Image: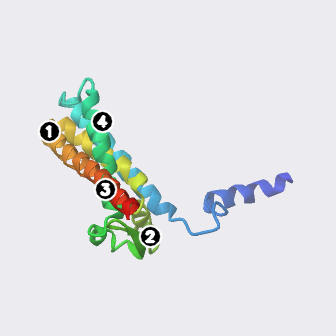
Amino acid sequence: MPLSDAPQQIADTVERPFEGHADQYRPFGGYAALVGAFNLSLAAFLVAAQRRGRLPERYPLADLALMSAGTFKLSRLIAKDRVTSVLRAPFTTFQDDAGHGEVDEAARGRGLRRAVGELLVCDYCLGQWVAAAYLAGYTVAPRPTRTVAALFTVYGAADVLQLGYSRLEDSSS
């Protein structure tokens, strides 16, 4: 590259830093807003909790297991459940039924609306937000947080039993 082209290439990189990253539209501004909101909220919570001496010294393994199972089920419920589509509808479009009370949806719109839609249909992506909410709740109010985590853990275990029972019924037919 000739040295005379360097200033233009630098200007192009600064003006259009995401150009060429993907063949499809990506709402990088929306992603940045979500990443910023998550990290700023988490940092503010941690600083406030630390100042008040509320951060646990350690987490019992049983509580971590309970919140982990609860995080799995609540994230999936938010992202896939037919009834919770009312929460996702402003940001998504229905694609198809996905079986066992779940639906498949796709993010819609542009900018922050699309970024939120992509977050809301991804149970893996939501897991980080749900886990942070559980840990924040655990820090402030451990007993109610354990109860909520237990609710979604039991709900998840019931799903496993329902699916197993359905498979047994199908195999006996």
Distance of label 4 from label 1 (alpha carbons): 17 Å
Tag 4 residue: 65
- Mark closer to the observer (4, 2): 4
Count up the numbered dots: 4
Q: Are marks 4 and 3 in contact (CB under 8 Å)?
A: no
As helix, strand or loop, the secondary structure at mark 1 comes to loop
* In this picture, residue 101 sits left or right of residue 26: left
Label 3 crowd (10 A; few <14 / some 14-19 / many >=20) = few
Of 172 and 71, the residue lying toward us: 172
Work out whether residue 6 can be spotted.
yes
- Kindly identify the residue that appears in the image at 51 percent across and 61 percent down: 28
As helix, strand or loop, the secondary structure at mark 3 comes to helix
Tag 3 residue: 165
Of 110 and 7, the residue lying toward us: 110
* In this picture, residue 131 sits left or right of residue 7: left
The amino acid sitting under disc 2 is Ala
Distance of label 1 from label 3 (alpha carbons): 36 Å
